[in-house]
């Protein structure tokens, strides 16, 4: 289980210039959203900038594993928001990018 207090460090990983770091950051956010089945820290993920960083990482066509992991995390985020009747698309700073990628 990934503790939510690591969200700032996960955001730092996803901002790294190293694709491997970005991949591991996205994977850890996905695991955080998946493992916390009762109530994942959605607000903390948003406030920590992770959701926007996941969307940005969809741009890296040269790193399909990173794109896949970012997409998996976004789908989990959307799944949890679906239960709350919230449109997860509205949380992305670049909605056009998300629409093009999904």
Image (spheres, rainbow, N blue to C red):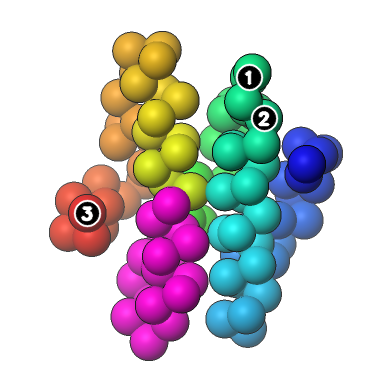
Q: Residues within 10 Å of mark 1 (few under 14, many from 20)?
A: few
Residue 15 visible somewhere in the drawing:
no
Q: Are marks 2 and 1 in contact (CB under 8 Å)?
A: yes
Residue 37 at x, y percent in the picture? 62, 25
Residue linked to disc 2 = 36
Comparing labels 3 and 2, the label whose residue is closer to the camera: 2
Q: Which range of residues does the magenta coloring cover?
A: 56-72
Please name whichever residue, 53 or 28, is drawn nearer the observer in this view of the structure.
28
Q: Above or below — where is 62 with respect to 13?
A: below
Mark number, residue 53? none
- Name the main secondary structure of what is drawn in magenta: helix
Q: CA distance from mark 3 to mark 2?
A: 25 Å
Q: Kindly identify the residue that appears in the image at 38 percent across and 87 percent down.
A: 62
Task: Classify residue 61 by image quadrant.
Answer: bottom left
Residue 80 at x, y percent in the picture? 45, 25
Residue 5 at x, y percent in the picture? 82, 39
Q: CA distance from mark 2 to mark 1?
A: 6 Å
The disc, 3 or 2, on the residue closer to the chain's N-terminal end is: 2
Residue linked to disc 1 = 39
Q: Residues within 10 Å of mark 2 (few under 14, many from 20)?
A: some
Residue 58 at x, y percent in the picture? 37, 65
The disc, 1 or 3, on the residue closer to the chain's N-terminal end is: 1
Image-based side of 77 in relation to 22, left or right? left
Q: Above or below — where is 82 with respect to 12?
A: above
Looking at this view, name the residue that lies furthest to the top.
84
Residue linked to disc 3 = 102
Q: Above or below — where is 101 with respect to 76?
A: below
The quarter of the rendered structure image containing the C terminus is: bottom left
Q: Residues within 10 Å of mark 3 (few under 14, many from 20)?
A: few
């Amino acid at each position: 289980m990934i503790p939510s207090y690591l969200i700032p460090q996960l955001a730092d990983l996803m901002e790294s210039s190293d694709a491997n770091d970005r991949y591991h950051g996205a994977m850890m956010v996905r695991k955080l959203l998946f493992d916390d089945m009762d109530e994942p820290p959605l607000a903390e993920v948003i406030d920590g900038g992770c959701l926007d960083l996941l969307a940005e990482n969809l741009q890296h066509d040269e790193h399909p594993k990173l794109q896949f992991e970012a997409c998996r995390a976004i789908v989990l985020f959307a799944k949890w928001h679906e239960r709350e009747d919230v449109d997860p698309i509205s949380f992305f700073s670049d909605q056009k990018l998300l629409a093009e990628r999904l």
